[in-house]
Amino acid sequence: MQRRDFVKKVGAGGLALSAGLTGTVRAKSDAEFKWKMVTTWPKNFPGLGTGANRLAELIGEMSGGRIQVKVYGATELVPALEVFDAVSRGTAEMGHGAAYYWKGKSEAAQFFSTVPFGLTAQEINGWFYYGGGLELWQELYGQFGLIPAPAGNSGVQMGGWFNKEIKSVEDLKGLKMRIPGLGGEVLTRAGGTAVNLPGGELFTALQSGLIDATEWVGPYNDLAFGLYKAAKYYYYPGWHEPGTCLEAMINKKAFEALPKDLQSIVLNACKVVNQDMLAEFTARNPGALQDLVKKHGVELRRFPDDVIKKLKQLSDEVVAEIGQKDEFSKKVYASYAKFLQQCREYSGVSELAYLIARDRT
Ligand code: CA
């Protein structure tokens, strides 16, 4: 008897509970959304591609399956460099890439990924979320029917893989290096030849001597690409990409069709992935660098001071010129440059001062 009573009670409680839950779900909306996410990365590529996968999974989990996002690697649905247009016209509801790929839309886009000798990962997130950076980014992408969101960061990249030693500024002259974007412009002004090649062609180009050097990301990604088999020296620091922010872009109409709670889930999932990817790189880069040096005999080299000084001087020129291209670029540059200057002053008593105290004394 006692047992039957117990079963009855549990049964009744269970019913009440499930009725309560059903009520809550109905109060929101049980509409389901099937989205496509196109990316500029090879499918499942460590760090960058897996970051896009993680974003899609999170949106699915956080929404209880009400939004299902299917991820397409570069070229699966559209080529890497058509991601922006594909999401803009609604071929896919979301994209994952990096804003500097879209400088053809506006030179200012480059400030939303990274610029040489610019903000670090920690600093650019400060600029985005609390320094006006994200509002400027929204203003730009809004013209194309898109909503942007920071969605990953590589942290400070490496200077790259070299088959020629860089001992002075003279050694940059005639150097054929795969280095895209503003870093490439800086190298050209230093007398080198900047070559732009997609990631998939780097290894062969380096091994065959078509190029003398290439940059890619950092130890974790570079190890996965096997670049150590094609070059002898691994240079640092990655002056050209000090904390590259990856982006999610969302088709505005698709976003506006979502109920409010799902809109919040999409944007907050981007925020989680933005931090999560940086944590992954932070955790995996040190071990990957050890493998490169200890297992694969890579020679680690720091760019000499006079080379860094020259690159910095040229970078400042190049970045300032981008900031004068048009009215919008002027506005973005003014905001970015002011924030950078504040960070430089503060770093001297915070991160920089602390790291010197911790690691160099
Ligand atoms: Ca890079």
Image (cartoon, grey):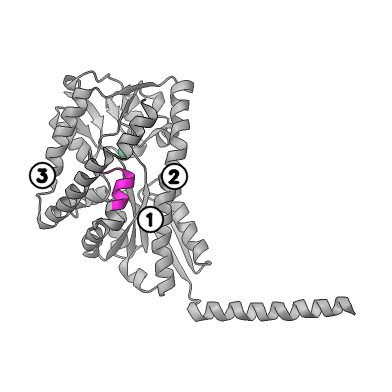
What residue is shown at x 13% (from left), y 32% (from top)?
A: 189
Could you give the CA–CA distance between mark 3 and mark 2, rounded to whole angstroms?
33 Å
Instruction: Answer whether residue 264 is magenta in the image.
Output: no
Say what secondary structure mark 1 lies in.
Answer: strand
Question: Measured along the vertical axis of the image, is residue 115 above or below residue 85?
Answer: above
Query: Disc 3 designates what residue?
Result: 321
Q: Of marks 1 and 2, which one's residue comes earlier in the chain?
A: 1
Tell me which label, 3 or 2, sits earlier in the chain: 2
Residue type at mark 3: give it: Glu
Give x and y (percent) for residue 213. Answer: 28, 27
Q: Nearer the viewer, mark 3 or mark 2?
A: 2
Image coordinates for residue 110, horizontal then vertical, percent: 22, 48
Q: Quadrant of the N terminus?
A: bottom right
Would you call the spot at circle 1 few (<14 residues within 10 Å), some (14-19), or many (20 or more)? many
Q: CA distance from mark 1 to mark 2?
A: 23 Å
Ligand 1 location (quadrant): top left
Quickly name the residue at label 2.
Answer: 279
From the image, give the main secondary structure of the stretch colored magenta.
Answer: helix
The foreground one among 314 and 104 is 314
Q: Amino acid at mark 1?
A: Val
